[in-house]
């Protein structure tokens, strides 16, 4: 492992891969545009064989490419080209994240990307946040519908109670005997009781619906807080990656400086060594090569001559020791 590889981490490599993947999306949009163009040229049933024979992509992949072009490219001109105001909003999306965002209505995508740390989420985290958002909105919508139905029901009950009151007043205005008056009093009392019971039931149902709506809103709030928490973690992770990248660049610059210093020191050393040292090094190298050649040839010598050769080698070594001062 060299010095540069030693300073790299899986997180740094992952960030580089994400950056490279994001740059692929613009090309995918253009591929989708050309696929749509060819589909218009071909007869019905000819497009899929053409895709398989000429591009190597599967039908599902081709459909995804064309869908990404229609959603991100056609209505906005060339979303990933120059001079497009929205290019920075979506330009860093990966292929899988761009597909995941298609679950959102088109008018909401840009705001969602701007208010969530989509670049720093994994695709699975992005899908989970979208699911939680949709579930919370659906729960709130259901609760609001139930409250609306209960209020409509209560209004109908109130109308019936008012009709009963009007009927009682009409009966009171007529000339009546005692027996009938007693019956009217009973009717009035029954109507009051019915109205009171209806109001109590309505209040109870409205309260239950409002409680359900409050819980749904709590879920929405929890989902939003979770999304914000994910954004915070993603921001922290992005900061760590930036710091690691800075450390890597600093280490690389230091390695370059060290290598340059080492090369300069070696150059000075060679410049100061002189001609005699150079000659010695060349002769010593030739001596080592001769020794290796003798060593390789020795096993092939006849066994009868090996003792004499060993004796000659020992004598030569002893002479060298004395000559170079080895006592």
Image (cartoon, helix red, strand yellow):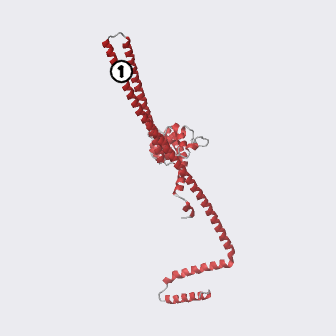
Location of the C terminus by quadrant is: bottom right
**Residue in the image at 62% along x and 62% along y:** 254
Question: Residue 186: x, y in percent?
Answer: 33, 18
The foreground one among 4 and 153 is 153
Residue 193: image quadrant is top left
Residue sticking out furthest to the left: 179
Mark 1 falls on what kind of element?
helix
Q: Which residue corresponds to the image point at 46% horizontal and 45% vertical from the top-left?
A: 128
Q: Residue 184 at x, y = what percent?
A: 34, 16
Residue 32 visible in image = yes
Can you say whether 152 is above or below 292 in the image? above
The location of residue 37, given as percent across then percent down, is: 52, 40
Horizontal relation, residue 281 to residue 208: left or right: right
Near-viewer residue (64 or 105): 105
Q: Kindly tell me whether residue 94 is visible in this rendering.
A: no
Q: Is residue 26 left or right of residue 262?
A: left
Q: Nearer the viewer, residue 67 or 247?
A: 247
Question: In the figure, residue 219 lies in which quadrant?
Answer: top left
Position of residue 317 in the picture relative to residue 58 (left or right): right
Furthest residue to the front?
178
Figure label count: 1
| Above or below, 249 relative to 64 | below
Mark 1 = which residue? 191
Q: Which of the 4 quarters of the picture holds residue 319?
A: bottom right
Q: Residue furthest top?
A: 175
Where in the figure is residue 130, as x and y percent of width and height? 47, 42
In this rendered view, identify the residue nearer to me: 15 or 202.
202
The 10 Å Cα crowd at callout 1, few under 14, some 14 to 19, many 20 or more, is some
């Amino acid at each position: 492992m060299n010095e540069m590889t030693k300073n790299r981490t899986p997180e740094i490599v992952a960030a580089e891969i994400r950056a490279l993947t994001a740059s692929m999306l613009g090309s995918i949009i253009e591929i989708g545009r050309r696929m749509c163009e060819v589909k218009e040229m071909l007869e019905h049933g000819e497009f899929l064989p053409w895709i398989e024979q000429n591009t190597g992509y599967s039908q599902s992949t081709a459909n995804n490419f064309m869908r990404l072009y229609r959603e991100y490219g056609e209505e906005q001109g060339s979303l990933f080209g120059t001079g497009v105001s929205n290019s920075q909003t979506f330009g860093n999306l990966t292929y899988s994240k761009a597909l995941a965002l298609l679950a959102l209505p088109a008018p909401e995508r840009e705001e969602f990307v701007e208010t969530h740390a989509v670049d720093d989420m994994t695709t699975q985290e992005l899908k989970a946040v979208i699911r939680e958002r949709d579930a919370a909105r659906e729960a709130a919508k259901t609760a609001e519908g139930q409250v609306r139905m209960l209020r409509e029901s209560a209004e109908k009950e109130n109308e019936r109670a008012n009709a009963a009151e009007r009927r009682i007043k009409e009966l009171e205005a007529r000339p009546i005997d005692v027996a009938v008056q007693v019956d009217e009093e009973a009717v009035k009392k029954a109507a009051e009781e019915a109205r009171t019971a209806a109001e109590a039931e309505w209040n109870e149902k409205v309260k239950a619906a409002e409680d359900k709506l409050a819980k749904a809103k709590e879920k929405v709030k929890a989902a939003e807080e979770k999304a914000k928490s994910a954004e915070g973690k993603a921001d922290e992770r992005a900061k760590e990656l930036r710091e690691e990248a800075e450390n890597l660049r600093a280490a690389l610059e230091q390695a370059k400086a060290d290598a340059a210093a080492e090369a300069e020191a070696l150059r000075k050393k060679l410049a100061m060594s002189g001609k005699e040292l150079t000659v010695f090094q060349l002769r010593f190298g030739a001596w080592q090569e001769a020794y290796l050649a003798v060593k390789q040839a020795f096993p092939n010598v006849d066994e009868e001559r090996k003792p004499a050769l060993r004796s000659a080698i020992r004598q030569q070594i002893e002479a060298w020791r004395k000559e170079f001062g080895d006592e």
